[in-house]
Each structure stands twice: as C-alpha cells, then as structure tokens.
Image (cartoon, helix red, strand yellow):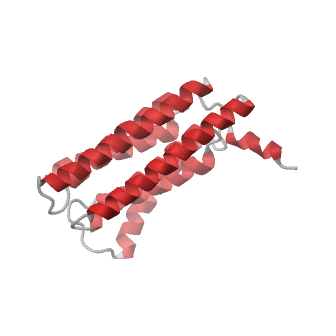
Amino acid sequence: MILFVDTLLVLMILSAFLLLGSSRLGACIRFVAFQGFLVGLFPLVVGTYGPSLRVVIIALVIVASKGIAFPVLLSRALRESETNREVQPFVGYGLSLLFGLISLVVSFQLDNRLGLPPHYSSDLVVPVSFFMMMGGLFLIVARKTAVNQVVGYLVLENGISVFGLALVRDIPVLIEMGVLMDVFVAVLVMGIAIYRINREFDHIDSDRLNQLKG
C-alpha cells in the first residue's frame, strides 16, 4: 500500500512540474483534473482508512468535484474566451521550473525541521503537500490569465487536502464536504469572473485590469 501511495505522490509532483512548465491553458486544466483524480484516491489508501461506504463516498465526491466538475467549468470558460496559451506570464516557464525544483527541496527541508506528528502512510506525503501549496501560490502570482490563476488555486487546495489526509487518521464528513462546497463556490465564482472579464474586455488577462485604475 505504501508503494501505491508513493506512486500517487510522484505523479502529483510530475503533474505540478507540467503545470509550471506549460503555456497551453487546455493542458493545464487537464493536468489539474488529473491531480483531482489522484487526490480522490487518497482517502482509500492512506492511514487506517478501510473500504467503508463513507470513505468511498468521500473519494467519489472528491473525484467528481476536483477531477470532473471544476475542470469542466474551467474548460467552458476557456472555450468562451477563445484563448489557447499564456504567452507572456510574469515569470517565464524556465524560471518557473527552477522555482519548482527549489521549492521541492525546501519542502523536504521543512518536513525535517518542523517535527510534525508521524505520517501514517508515506514519508513523502508532507513534503509533496508543501510543494503543491507553494506551487499553487506561485501559479496564482506568476501567471496573468485568470484561468491559470484558478488552476493555481486548485493546486493549492489539493496540497492542503493531501496535508490533511497525511496527518489525520479520520475525516469528519461534514468538514470535508464543507471544504469541498467552499472550493466549488470559489471556482464557480472565478469561472463567472473569467466569463465576465472576457465578455467586457475580449481577453482573460487579469493583469490588464490594472488599466481600470483611475
């Protein structure tokens, strides 16, 4: 089981690097959808969780929301905007990959220094969750298009979810569903915002909204 968890975590690292290095918005949405599927598998394989009906329902809800619903909303917003690539981000893709490498090393150092409780599944879980949180924040700050910024928010939330699953033996259902509902509302609002930005300004470059300052 630990080998399977490690495999999921390595796939998450690879998907995060693909997000940092890709200019194609459609591909970024697919990568974050793949991450959502991976996060949805975690309740089934980490800690002391068993194949109970409650755990299966939680996993299905995570997959349905993060792996299907959110990417569908983003894909629809992307089609409406008729935008395919982010050409000039604040930070170039080469430097973004370098940041990813540095943040991965820093994440392992943080895990060693913080003295967190024992991990119930894999020693990689906490460093990978830190790496995803830093990567998500970086995407929010370093990208101009609203779609990529929403993708960064989802990556950040995925990292938080992995961190919680790493350190908590049991998942309170109401808390988990409440968090997912908050994320759903946030992504829905962001999708509407992307649509409105494109409708009014014929682009989804959030940086150009600075021109509205009077």
Q: Residue at x 23, y 54 (%)?
A: 43
Q: Relative to 18, is 117 above or below?
A: below
Of residues 128 and 192, the one drawn nearer to the viewer in this rendering: 192
Q: Tell me if 59 is positioned left or right of 147 in this view.
A: left
The residue at 30%/43% (across/down) is 63
Q: Is residue 117 above or below residue 195?
A: below
Quarter of the rendering containing residue 49: bottom left
Residue visible at 58% across and 40% down?
Answer: 192
Q: Residue furthest right?
A: 214
Q: Is residue 17 left or right of residue 79?
A: left
Question: Which residue is pictured at 61% across the width and 23% down the height?
Answer: 82
Residue 143 position, x and y percent, is: 61, 43
Residue 130 picture location, percent across and down? 41, 60
Between residues 14 and 164, which one lies in front from this camera angle? 164
Q: Is residue 9 left or right of residue 97?
A: left
The foreground one among 214 and 1 is: 214
Expressed as whole percent of the image width and height from the top left, the position of residue 201 reads: 74, 32
Residue 2 seen anywhere in this rendered image of the structure = no
Does 167 appear above or below 124? below
